[in-house]
Amino acid sequence: MDRIVHVLFGDFPTVLDAVIKTSALFVTAALLFRFTERRTLAEFAPFDWIAAVAAGAIVGRAATASDTSWLAATAALLCLLATHAVLARLRFVPLLQRLIDPPLHVLIRDGQVDRRALRRCGLTVTDLDAVLRQHGHPDAARVHLAILEAKGAISVLGAETSCPARVDGSLPAAAQPDSSPQEHQ
């Protein structure tokens, strides 16, 4: 019976150590994140999600691990946040941005749904229809462009929305699909 009680409740000094270390790690993480860029969850790029999950794993693991000190966890958090900051800055280099951020995908162009692009993005026509309704469009017919953005949101431009086309009729680089035109026919 004593073994069961010990397994369930542990001993007081060990529990107290976990409480102190967890509190210290939370305050440390809160202070460190205070100095990083502010973004909401909706604005997270894939590398932001990786950093957030990794930071949670560091805090969660170190809080209860008897073999990991507060200092080691703080050093890991500092390294993670510094790497994240460098990666965020590297996104301003066009060549590196293409490696870091996922490409844009044109899902609808001038009322025509690109089913191949939908498949590549892991979306169904039903998913797209739901997004169109959220944007006030009953169907794709009156949609000029629907673009899956790098951060996962779908932007919808209606037929009445003016999109700055070039003289040759092509779209600006931001509205270009991620692959060759033959794939979109």
Image (cartoon, helix red, strand yellow):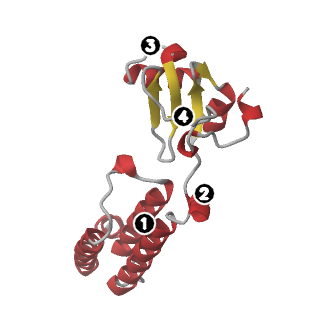
Given residues 157 and 6, the one toward you in this image is 157
- Seen in the picture, residue 135 relative to 79 is either above or below; the reply is above
- Kindly report the distance in space between the C-alpha atoms of the residues bearing marks 3 and 2: 34 Å
The 10 Å Cα crowd at callout 3, few under 14, some 14 to 19, many 20 or more, is: some
- Pick the quarter of the image with the N terminus: bottom left
N-terminal of the two: label 4 or label 1? 1
N-terminal of the two: label 2 or label 4? 2
Q: In the rendered structure, find residue 98 and report the number of the disc placed on it.
A: 2
Please, what secondary structure does the residue beneath circle 1 have? helix
The 10 Å Cα crowd at callout 2, few under 14, some 14 to 19, many 20 or more, is: few
- Kindly report the distance in space between the C-alpha atoms of the residues bearing marks 2 and 4: 23 Å
Q: Position of residue 63 (x, y in %)?
A: 33, 73
Q: Position of residue 161 (x, y in %)?
A: 42, 25
Task: Identify residue for label 3.
Answer: 138
Residue 66 visible from this viewpoint: no
Amino acid at the residue labelled 2: Arg
Q: Nearer the viewer, mark 3 or mark 1?
A: 3
N-terminal of the two: label 2 or label 1? 1
Amino acid at the residue labelled 3: Pro
N-terminal of the two: label 3 or label 4? 3
N-terminal of the two: label 3 or label 1? 1
Q: Position of residue 41 (x, y in %)?
A: 35, 50
Task: Identify residue for label 1.
Answer: 57
Q: Nearer the viewer, mark 3 or mark 4?
A: 4
